[in-house]
Image (tube, coloured by chain):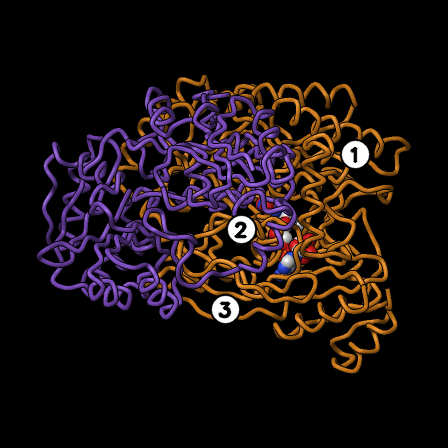
């Protein structure tokens, strides 16, 4: 059997053709989530990096449509020219992640805390399913209740339901200025209590991350808005918290850029995304600490990034025990999910419709 | 289809008081708020527990009898219209708030819980449930989930789908699934999001996990009057483009202003052709600073007058006029049709001018009261069903407005759903392949198409519309519409 190494479609029709011509396919974007590219050796790689560019962007509309292979970097730069941004703060921008890969992996970053995650901003998609059909769901307007929400199906589909070729997002105006408070906490419990209080408070917080540093639990609280009021707002937040120190302006953006690049993961370690809640964190913390993992809890305690040093079967067992789920983004894994999984039987039904011949890896 | 077999089995499990079969008992269930459609189910099961629902669905599946889940029956698109000779599963009695966790800001509720009751239960903790359809006093969370319902305050934080974290549901073939959970995040395809907005075609939601938000520290509300509807529409585009992020942005036209004034004396300027309400919310000092900016933008949009709400009472009065406008307009006319479509926000002015032109062309009055900030139009077409030809003209006008929405790159529905009403428009919005894939997905969950059969997908003959009128509850003044 001929092994086709890589196909680089330049049009939607190329994608359709490639899908029809290859019994086994793995879709590749920027390659920043290497564990999601694992496949049988026979599988052809569909390299999406040639299917790029903004298709439609009217800044006054706060909506854009771009081809899936467009890098987040390009999207962010185009939006920034008009003072706009992707509020869900996708990770791995600098590393070359593409729009399609980010949707397929279902990834949002620390900034998701303010207005919601990728799922909340994706308003339309076009994809080629496993039968080579070009399908559209959703639309290009910010509100739309027509038809099943196919865009949501693509979020987290890790290239196994179809090849995303185009996506429409709503975007927001970027706050003109940011400031971050670093607030060390006496204990994990105290940190979680503070997070719960903050989440229920009237402070408008852009990002709220919990880091486990040498000295213990530290909260990073980011505020955004008009430069003229930011100082006073940070001051009232600090007073309310009873402490904390402002990150120097020079370090502020760099801190969050570092968070976005997930650059703190030691080389060779696995990287796992695990959805959590404030209630789940204390128990998870125990097993992660015991396993020697490095970790960050972002999005106000909605999501754990776990850097895992050893064998993933161990983490899989822990997460299963705690009834938590995880997606392996980097590391040696033949199957990307660890821990429990909800709705797997429904996902399987969807898979049978969109990819009955399993051209894409199983889901 | 073995209807007798189903009814026998249901009767052996449920008392007659909860299994309605007499014509007089069935009558109230024959239509929803799109009163033009009517059809009689074989029976209505008043489900009391989640298990009742699961059993009923399994029996329907076994006997191949179609069923329709029903909340409060306020659908404006015929979504909860019964299937002739099918079963209606009424969910109002499943009204438990199973759990409310203020620390995690979530509420786990059964589908029959009334929308506003979630916010009421959350209020002691300073929290609320954001999506606020005008029917929120009466509509259920189950119905909201099925339609991905919105409201006036969905501009910043989104519609129902953005606030649903998990759904436990019984699929049409009886399998019970748990989708999503309590985290805001998820791995694998977003099946919770896929379920929301499925219009009752994916089975019945049994338990829904909702995200709650803290109440904003401050609201600042401004009311601007304009000489033309188009000018108000253009002002919306200017506010959107200014980089401000209002919590709500609503427009009313002259007809709506007049009707609202007559009904609740909101203090609106009566000589305006259009009113724009813009509201900012958030941290006090930030909102105050942004509000100053907003007023500058509004001043630059050439308004006739600008009124700022001085206090909570002022704000409440402004919103009262807005929220009552729909029913108030309805009272101006023997009959009316409510349309629901979306256009890109930057083209609102153009869309409103087109609606005015179409209104003149068909010689029918159209009132506009709508969610301007997200381009969601709600033209209300007034007509008299007793005058020969008026209903037909009204329908033609409604169809042309929807076509305009599509031509401008918008959508055939923003929040009322496709239901029965918009089935034929699905063909213009989606390709045959798109619809084929959606139909296949539906059959993967429901091979016999028993769950809300006949809705959403374009089908053969639609039952003829007869006339339109207010929902019985609106006539009683219990609810009012957007
Ligand atoms: C006066 C008035 C004002 C309105 N204002 C608004 C508004 O501002 N914004 C807006 O979006 N809508 C509005 N609506 C429309 C309507 O209120 C919403 O669509 C609402 O969500 C319907 O809720 P319900 O409980 O009445 O559902 P129903 O009408 O009973 O059912 C609606 C649909 O949901 C399905 N369904 C119900 N429960 C479940 C369940 N548990 N699982 C699966 N499917 C289920 C039904 O089969 C049906 O297809 C308004 C309606 C009226 C009459």
Spatial distance from mark 1 to mark 3, Cα to Cα? 42 Å
Q: Chain of mark 1?
A: B
Identify the hue of chain A: purple
Q: Secondary structure at mark 2?
A: loop
Which residue is found at the position 39% from the left and 45% from the top? A116
Q: Nearer the viewer, mark 1 or mark 3?
A: 3
Residue B264 location (% of width, % of height): 57, 44
Residue A210 location (% of width, % of height): 22, 53
In the rendered image, which residue does mark 1 sit on? B383
Which residue is found at the position 60% from the left and 42% from the top? B415
Image vertical order of residue A117 relative to residue B354, above or below: below
| Residue B177 falls in image quadrant | bottom right
Which of disc 3 and disc 1 is earlier in sequence? 3
Q: Which class describes the residues within 10 Å of circle 3: few (<14), some (14-19), or many (20+)?
A: some
In the visual, does A74 lie left or right of A64?
left
In the visual, does B72 lie left or right of B306?
right
Spatial distance from mark 3 to mark 2, Cα to Cα? 38 Å
Residue B331 location (% of width, % of height): 71, 42
Q: Which mark is residue A362?
A: 2
Q: Is residue A13 visible?
A: yes
Image vertical order of residue A299 relative to residue A281, above or below: above
- Asked whether B229 or B315 is in front, the reply is B229
Q: Chain of mark 2?
A: A
Q: Nearer the viewer, mark 1 or mark 2?
A: 2
Q: Which chain is orange?
A: B
């Amino acid at each position: 059997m001929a092994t086709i190494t890589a196909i680089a479609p330049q049009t939607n029709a190329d994608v359709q053709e490639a899908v029809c011509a290859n019994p086994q396919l793995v879709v590749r974007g920027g390659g920043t989530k290497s564990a999601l590219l694992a496949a049988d050796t026979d599988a052809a790689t569909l390299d999406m990096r040639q299917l790029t560019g903004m298709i439609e962007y009217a800044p006054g509309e706060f909506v854009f449509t771009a081809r899936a292979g467009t890098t987040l970097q390009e999207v962010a730069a185009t939006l920034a020219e008009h003072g706009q941004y992707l509020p869900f703060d996708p990770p791995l921008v600098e590393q070359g992640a593409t729009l399609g890969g980010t949707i397929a992996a279902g990834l949002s970053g620390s900034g998701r805390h303010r207005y919601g995650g990728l799922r909340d901003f994706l308003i339309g998609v076009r994809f080629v399913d496993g039968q080579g059909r070009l399908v559209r769901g959703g639309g290009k307007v910010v509100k739309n209740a027509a038809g099943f929400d196919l865009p949501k199906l693509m979020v987290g589909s890790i290239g196994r339901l179809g090849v995303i070729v185009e996506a429409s997002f709503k975007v927001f105006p970027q706050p003109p200025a940011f400031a971050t408070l670093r607030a060390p906490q006496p204990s994990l419990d105290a940190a979680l209590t503070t997070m719960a209080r903050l989440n229920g408070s009237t402070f408008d917080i852009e990002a709220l991350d919990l880091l486990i540093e040498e000295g213990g639990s530290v909260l990073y609280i980011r505020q955004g808005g008009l430069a003229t009021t930011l100082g006073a707002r940070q001051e009232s937040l600090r007073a309310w918290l009873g402490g904390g120190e402002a990150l120097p302006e020079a370090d502020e953006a760099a801190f969050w850029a570092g968070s976005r690049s997930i650059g703190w993961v030691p080389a060779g370690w696995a990287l796992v995304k695990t959805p959590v809640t404030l209630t789940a964190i204390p128990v998870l913390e125990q097993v992660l600490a015991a396993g020697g993992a490095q970790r960050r809890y972002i999005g106000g305690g909605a999501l754990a990034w776990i850097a895992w040093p050893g064998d993933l079967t161990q983490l899989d067992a822990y997460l299963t025990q705690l009834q938590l789920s995880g997606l392996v983004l980097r590391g040696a894994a033949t199957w990307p999910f660890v821990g429990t999984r909800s709705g797997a039987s429904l996902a399987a039904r969807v898979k049978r419709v969109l990819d009955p011949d399993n051209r894409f890896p199983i889901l | 289809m073995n209807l007798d077999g189903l009814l026998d089995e249901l009767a052996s499990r449920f008392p007659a008081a909860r299994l309605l079969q007499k014509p007089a008992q069935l009558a109230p269930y024959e239509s929803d708020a799109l009163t033009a459609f009517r059809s009689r189910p074989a029976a209505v099961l008043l489900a009391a527990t989640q298990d009742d629902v699961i059993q009923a669905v399994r029996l329907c599946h076994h006997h191949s009898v179609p069923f329709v889940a029903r909340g409060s029956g306020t659908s404006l698109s015929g979504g909860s219209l019964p299937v002739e000779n099918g079963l209606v599963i009424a969910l109002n009695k499943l009204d438990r708030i199973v759990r409310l966790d203020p620390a995690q800001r979530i509420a786990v509720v059964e589908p029959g819980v009334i929308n506003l009751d979630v916010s009421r239960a959350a209020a002691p903790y300073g929290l609320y449930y954001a999506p606020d359809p005008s029917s929120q006093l009466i509509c259920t969370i189950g119905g909201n989930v099925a339609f991905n319902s919105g409201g006036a305050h969905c501009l910043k934080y989104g519609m129902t789908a953005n606030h649903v974290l998990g759904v436990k549901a019984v699929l049409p073939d009886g399998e019970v699934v748990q989708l999503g959970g309590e985290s805001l995040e998820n791995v694998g395809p977003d099946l919770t999001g896929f379920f929301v907005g499925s219009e009752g075609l994916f089975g019945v939601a049994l338990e829904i996990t909702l995200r709650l938000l803290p109440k904003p520290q401050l609201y600042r509300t401004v009311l601007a009057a304009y000489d033309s509807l188009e000018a108000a529409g253009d002002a919306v585009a200017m506010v959107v483009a200014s980089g401000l992020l209002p919590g709500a942005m609503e427009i009313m036209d002259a007809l709506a202003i007049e009707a609202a004034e007559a009904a609740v004396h909101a203090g609106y300027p009566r000589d305006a052709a259009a009113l724009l309400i813009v509201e900012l919310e958030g941290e006090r000092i930030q909102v105050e600073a942004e509000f100053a900016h907003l007023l500058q933008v509004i001043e630059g949009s050439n308004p006739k007058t600008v009124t700022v709400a001085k206090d909570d009472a002022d704000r409440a009065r402004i919103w009262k006029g807005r929220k009552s406008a729909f029913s108030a307009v309805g009272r101006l006319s023997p009959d009316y049709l409510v349309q629901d479509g979306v256009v890109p926000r930057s083209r609102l002015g153009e869309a409103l001018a087109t609606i005015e032109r179409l209104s003149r062309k068909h010689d029918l009055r159209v009132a506009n009261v709508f969610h301007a900030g997200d381009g969601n139009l709600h033209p209300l077409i007034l007509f008299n069903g007793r005058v020969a030809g008026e209903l037909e003209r009204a329908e033609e006008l409604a169809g042309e407005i929807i076509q305009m929405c599509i031509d401008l790159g918008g959508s055939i529905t923003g929040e009322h759903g496709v239901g029965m009403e918009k089935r034929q428009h699905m063909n213009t919005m989606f390709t045959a392949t798109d619809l084929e894939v959606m139909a296949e997905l539906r059959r993967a969950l429901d091979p016999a198409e028993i769950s809300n059969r006949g809705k959403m997908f374009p089908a053969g003959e639609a039952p003829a519309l007869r006339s339109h009128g207010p929902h019985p509850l609106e006539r009683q003044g219990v609810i009012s519409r957007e």
